[in-house]
Amino acid sequence: MPVSMTQFLTALGVTLVAVLLTVLVVHLLVLASARRWAAARDLARHARTPFRLVVLAVALSGLAAARRPELVDASWWAGVRLALRLASIGAGAWLLASVLLFLEDLGLKRYRTDTSDNLTARRVRTQVLVVRRLTVSVVVVIGLGAALLSFPGVRAVGASLLASAGLVSVVAALAAQSILANVFAGIQLAFNDAIRIDDVVIVEQEWGWIEEITLSYVVVRLWDDRRMVLPSTYFTRTPFQNWTRHHSELLGAVELDVDWRVDVGAMREELDRVLADTDLWDGRSKVLQVTDAVGGVVRVRVLVTAKDAGTLFDLRCLVRERLVTWVQRSDAAGLVRQRVELVEATANVVRPDADAEHSGVFSGDVHSEARGARFRRSEPK
């Protein structure tokens, strides 16, 4: 109802004082709660600004709905009330999102990824990060819906839109098919444990680890610090390698081609010394075997294990370097050689027609000629 400007300013002052007292009381309650619950201080830091905006916007919106200065036109005042209502909805959505994100982060802090056994922590972190994005999206959609319903025209149009909702849903589904497929794939990846944050994967013949998982795409950080961005549907439709699916320990191979005179036993002893002097080997397995011996060389394969993919790569390089150095310095007989044998010509020269004395598959004797005749078409007489 219209009131004088003096009355309105008085009511405005009382409202602002009430807002100030409310904020002060809540602040004191948070300080008291922080003595028993340490996370209360973090909650206050996250929600301080949106909470103050909510209290202020709601208080001013209530004042605008109850009193209108007589010097302000009713149509203009309706616009002010609408703006305050929208501000209240926006601040409320911000506050709700802040509280929900704080609770999600609070649960995430219980799981650390900087430990050797971090499988559960990486799974929870992946799920929480996807849920965070889903939470923000849902809160934004709800806030926009509430804001649109504040306009009288939108409410009037809504009734007519419901009649054609079936057609609109079909058109929207066709237009957003790929987007929705990626969204559902992102949610599926977060909870089926196919990939997690920091998982080591092989995608598109590239080695890297999962850096980020969203509702629509996955970012893979490659070994040379490049980023490969793949749609979420890639990991639900395309085969890929996950080297840390259940654990991060891996087995790797090192292959060397050496001469037949190499001392395999001494090479095996050198491998033991190399692994004993490095922290890269996790102590689970070590094997040196001769896997092939053709073409003038002997192929030696070494199998070693390490705690993760990066450590395994360094360990394989170390073993290869040390064994090559050992062959050069301690077992020169193992260096690959190409051997050529010189043979003197003999006095017996083969006659040019000697091959005719030997039977072949299809010629040379009666049986061979019979076989060959099956492939010759008889001429008509």
Image (cartoon, grey):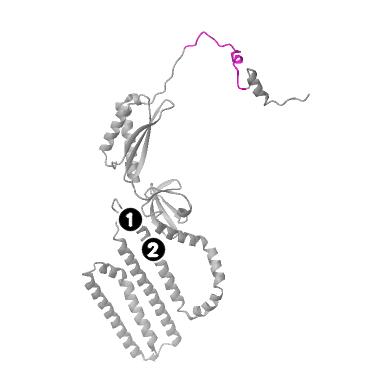
Dot 2, how many residues are within 10 Å of its Cα: few (below 14), some (14-19), or many (20+)?
some
Viewer-proximal residue, 337 or 252? 252
Q: Give the x, y percent position of residue 210.
A: 39, 53
Above or below, comparing residue 121 to residue 365 in the picture: below
Residue occupying image coordinates x 50% and y 10%: 346
Badge 1 vs badge 2, beta-carbon distance below 8 Å: no
* Amino acid type indicated by mark 2: Val
Viewer-proximal residue, 223 or 171? 171
Dot 1, how many residues are within 10 Å of its Cα: few (below 14), some (14-19), or many (20+)?
some
Which span of residues is magenta-colored? 344-361
- Count all numbered tags in the image, as a single digit: 2
Secondary structure beneath label 2: helix
Residue closest to the far left? 35
**Is 349 part of what is drawn in magenta?**
yes
Residue occupying image coordinates x 48% and y 53%: 237
Query: Which quadrant of the view contains residue 360?
Result: top right
Above or below, comparing residue 2 to residue 113 in the picture: below
Secondary structure beneath label 1: helix
What residue does disc 2 label? 131
* Amino acid type indicated by mark 1: Thr
Query: Which quadrant of the view contains residue 44?
Result: bottom left
Q: Give the x, y percent position of residue 301.
A: 37, 34
Which numbered tag is attached to residue 96? none
**Is 201 part of what is drawn in magenta?**
no
Which mark is first along the chain, 2 or 1? Answer: 1
Residue occupying image coordinates x 43% and y 60%: 187
Residue closest to the far top? 347
Above or below, comparing residue 49 to residue 298 in the picture: below
What residue does disc 1 label? 120
Q: CA distance from mark 1 to mark 2?
A: 16 Å
